Amino acid sequence: MATIDITEQSFAQTLENSEIVFVDFWAAWCGPCRQFAPTYGAAAERHPDITFAKVDTEAEQALAAAAKITSIPTLMAFKDKTLVFSQPGALNATGFEEVIQAVKNLDMNELHSQAGPQHA
């Protein structure tokens, strides 16, 4: 599956409809963003079971602000509608693949049980 563009209007629905969603916050004028784009697209082709979304921070300034984006590119990963990874900067293909596998292997039940006592 190729990458999809998401907007402030489609963001919540995208998270609702997919177990794992990676979101690349980028802008056309950003050199590192353009360098990361082929790596991101190739990962999307290798992992059709994951939703790979892109947010143009120029066109979607409100969404970028809501996500507290201060540097681009910023990569976020959501699993079961929960933010599990957020990092500014472009990853190389190997590093990105490691993040993808870590998110896939993340035990959300364990994560929620660890978070539970902290919220009490």
Image: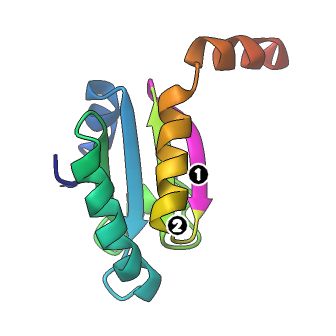
Instruction: Tell which of 2 and 60 is nearer to you.
Output: 2
Kindly identify the residue that appears in the image at 51 percent across and 64 percent down.
74
Q: Tell me which amino acid carries mark 2.
A: Leu
Queried whether the magenta region covers residue 12, the answer comes back as no
Q: Is residue 65 visible?
A: no
Where residue 19 sits in the image (x, y, percent)? 36, 26
Above or below, 59 relative to 30: above
Secondary element type, mark 2: loop
- In this rendering, would 43 be left or right of 95? left
**Nearer-N-terminus badge (1/2):** 1
Check if residue 83 falls in the magenta segment. yes
SS assignment at label 1: strand
What residue did someone put label 1 on? Answer: 86
- Estimate the spatial distance between the alpha carbons at disc 1 and disc 2, rounded to whole Å: 12 Å
102 relative to 110, above or below = below
Mark 1 crowd level (few <14, some 14–19, many ≥20, 10 Å Cα): some
> Which residue ends up furthest to the left in the rendered image?
1
Q: Which residues are magenta?
A: 80-87
Residue at screen point 83% across, 19% down? 118
Q: Amino acid at mark 1?
A: Ser
Q: Nearer the viewer, mark 1 or mark 2?
A: 2
Circle 2: is it few (<14), some (14-19), or many (20+) Cα within 10 Å?
some
Identify which residue is drawn at 53% across, 27% down: 105
One can see residue 64 in this view: yes
Among the 4 quarters of the image, the one containing residue 38: bottom left
- Mark seen at residue 91: 2
**Image coordinates for residue 15, horizontal then vertical, percent:** 34, 33
**Secondary structure of the magenta portion, mostly?**
strand
